[in-house]
Amino acid sequence: GGSTLLDNLADRVVTALDADGCAVHRPELGSLVATVPTDPQTRNEARQAVAAVDDEAVRLKSAVKSRDGFFTTHFISPYSRYIARWCARRGLTPNQVTTASLLTAIIAAGCAATGTRVGFVAAGVLLLFSFVLDCVDGQIARYALQYSTLGAWLDATFDRAKEYAYYAGLALGAARGGDDVWALALGAMILQTCRHVVDFSFNEANHDATANTSPTAALSDKLDSVGWTVWVRRMIVLPIGERWAMIAVLTAVTTPRITFYVLLVGCAFAATYTTAGRVLRSLTRKATRTDRAARALADLADNGPIASFVARVSPARLGAPFLIALAGTAVLVATLFSGAAWAPVAGAFVYAIAAGQALSHPLKGSLDWLVPPLFRAAEYCTVLILAAEAEVNGALPAAFGLVAAVAYHHYDTVYRIRGNAGASPAWLVRAIGGHEGRTLLVTVLAAALTASQFPVALTVLAVAVALLVLVESIRFWVSAGAPAVHDEGEPA
């Protein structure tokens, strides 16, 4: 009506929300248009700019993650977005494509388990195709705006299930050829899981920390301004795209043993690089961590009844949580290699006490985020070492199954926390013993049982843990009211 708009109501609302402490999301506009015209000329210009936007091109571009690995960005996404559009137009949902990706990876693992060169080549090809589908499911969600809590959980957990099932397939295939690589397969799964826990723990400890700056972080930001360094740094950490491409090629042209050797070396280097950088950031930044961060780290630690009891009755903590946990882990490792049958039991008992001591107070120290990954490494490596020392057929495959079941529980805890749904229920943690209870139980089984009985006991324990955590996890995620967690696509 000829009146002049003095200010923008939307901006006033946003300012009020910011002042009230509410998190306001500000997406990048990219090629989209958003403006408040103040006169007929600017209104016409805005309408012309809106009309000039190619909606379909925007949807396709937005379907791709804004930050991804080199292999995914340059070798998968240029065509997978069109597959995603094809699937969306035919009514296929992200969850259906996620399930297809899982089935493809399982078939790939089955091909690898044949132990033949043809099987290995087919396994490599199918693993790559499974990864393409893994990219497509998220792109469908972003293209069609079909986000769901269940979809986020399926996408996250199936990625781990696919990779670890493929490790098992490679180990089975090697066994058909007379080569036992189960220890390497289990080692690769342990290393990869611990890498993920390092990522999750560091992010949870720092995502809402105040005064969260350091010279190391400033250097990283400066390197991000140099284009080629961004891609190099993304590649050397072996993200899922680079890692699966490497595994697929090595499977097709080499042997399972060589595949695992290269995988272990590459992941060990990546883990050292990322962990060292995060330790430097933690030591050089002066950050104050929140109660929420301390609670998340305590949940990720997965302390069971024994450690929880020690934490309650401890009059005072004896030192920094990370140092206490490190000392307990060192004692455990020393007893595992002592050669005495019952020494690991005593080491596991000391480890359980140290775990309780470490969590007797909130985890707010600069290096306390290392406590959960240290506990993961201690528990998983205990199972690996004792199974390897048993030197009996079936021990290492049973250990692989047990670690896989426990790792699923730990991943499930992570995704619950990320979805702001809280950690796994206390009754479940108590029922499966916590990390210190399972570690102590495995050492007792190894000492008390014969070599032939030990694999059976590990198998029974693996099945029991898997049933408990899977039933509770499926029940929770199918009925959860947690918000859907998803990665955004590229700016439109």
Image (cartoon, rainbow, N blue to C red):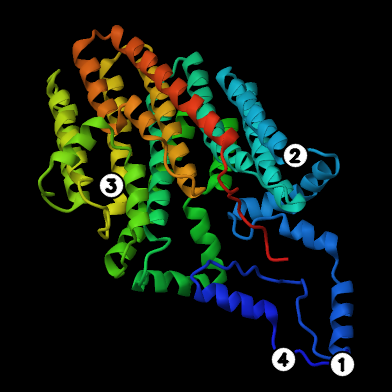
Disc 3 vs disc 4: Cβ atoms closer than 8 Å?
no
Amino acid carrying label 1: it is Gly
The tag earlier along the polypeptide, 3 or 4, is 4
Q: Can the viewer see residue 181 in this picture?
A: no
Judging depth in this view, the residue of 115 and 162 nearest the camera is: 162
Q: CA distance from mark 2 to mark 4?
A: 45 Å
- The residue lying toward the viewer, choosing from 173 and 437, is 437
SS category of the residue bearing label 2: loop
**Location of the N terminus (image quadrant):** bottom right
Q: Horizontal placement of 399 versus 482: left or right?
A: left
Q: Amino acid at mark 2?
A: Thr
Q: Which residue is mark 3?
A: 371
In three-dimensional space, the C-alpha distance between marks 2 and 1, rounded to whole angstroms, equals 48 Å
- Residue mark closest to the camera, 3 vs 4: 4
**Labelled pair 2, 4 in contact (Cβ < 8 Å):** no
- The earlier-in-sequence mark between 2 and 4 is 4
> Is 346 on the left-hand or right-hand side of 170?
left
Distance CA(mark 1)–CA(mark 4) = 12 Å
Classify 10 Å Cα crowding around label 4: few (below 14), some (14-19), many (20 and above): few
**Residue depicted at x 79% and y 38%:** 92
Of the two numbered discs 2 and 3 on the same chain, state the one appearing first in sequence: 2
Q: Which residue is mark 2?
A: 93
- Asked which secondary structure carries label 1, the reply is loop
**Residue 33 appears in the picture as rendered:** yes
Upstream in sequence: badge 2 or badge 1: 1
Q: Residue 342: percent from the left, percent from the top? A: 13, 19
For residue 230, side relative to residue 96 (left or right) = left
Q: Position of residue 228 (x, y in %)?
A: 55, 67
From mark 3 to mark 4, how far is it between C-alphas? 54 Å
